[in-house]
Image (tube, grey):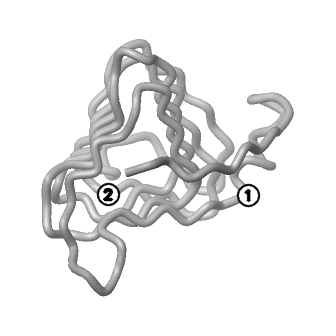
Amino acid sequence: LNIVSAAGFPNFDNKKVVILVDGDLTFNSAFNPPNSSVAFIVKGRIQIAGSVSAVRAILIQSSTSATFDTGTSSTQLVGTGMWISYGGFNLGRTFGAADASEKVLYDAKMLLDLTGILGGTSFNWQEVAP
């Protein structure tokens, strides 16, 4: 699934949606539907182009043989929602020393909105060694 522009994608404003992707998911444009809760569960690789600065969604990469790649860029990437990858992350951005190159703002409301579809919640917070 290729998200080239939000304008060409269905209107997710004020919606609660879970999308299952049997393959790869690529964001070539910012994805920021207002007042919505959108989750992508992806069997393949998740890739965010280096030119993208914002993605607002729950992104779950469910395969240990694929990765979640944030692209190579000096542009900061701000993700709102939650990111999970069973295959690992490739964090390739270099924004600067003063702030994070990839910043994920956890949005509990998204998860609560989608609990009826995704199931119950369980949290295991841990730091991953560099």
Residue 105 quadrant: bottom right
Query: How far apart are labels 2 and 1 at the CA level?
Result: 21 Å
Percent from the top left, x then y, of residue 102? Answer: 35, 63
Question: Viewer-proximal residue, 30 or 67?
Answer: 67
In the image as oriented, which residue stretches furthest toward the bottom? Answer: 98
Tell whether 124 sits left or right of 21: right
Q: Residues within 10 Å of mark 1 (few under 14, many from 20)?
A: few
Disc 2 marks which residue?
30
Residue at horizontal 53 percent and vertical 38 percent from the top? 84
Question: Viewer-proximal residue, 25 or 85?
Answer: 85
Residue at horizontal 35 percent and vertical 36 percent from the top? 68
Question: Viewer-proximal residue, 124 or 36?
Answer: 124
From the viewer's perspective, is residue 80 above or below residue 96? above
Residue 67 quadrant: top left
Percent from the top left, x then y, of residue 27? Answer: 29, 43
Tell whether 58 sits left or right of 90: right
Asked if the residue at tag 1 contacts the one at tag 2, i.e. Cβ–Cβ closer than 8 Å, the answer is no
The residue type indicated by label 1 comes to Ala
Q: Residues within 10 Å of mark 2 (few under 14, many from 20)?
A: many
Residue at horizontal 32 percent and vertical 23 percent from the top? 24
The residue type indicated by label 2 comes to Ala
* Badge 2 element: loop
Percent from the top left, x then y, of residue 54? Answer: 36, 63
Percent from the top left, x then y, of residue 91? Answer: 28, 50
Q: Earlier in the sequence, mark 2 or mark 1?
A: 2
Disc 1 marks which residue?
108
From the viewer's perspective, is residue 50 above or below residue 20? below
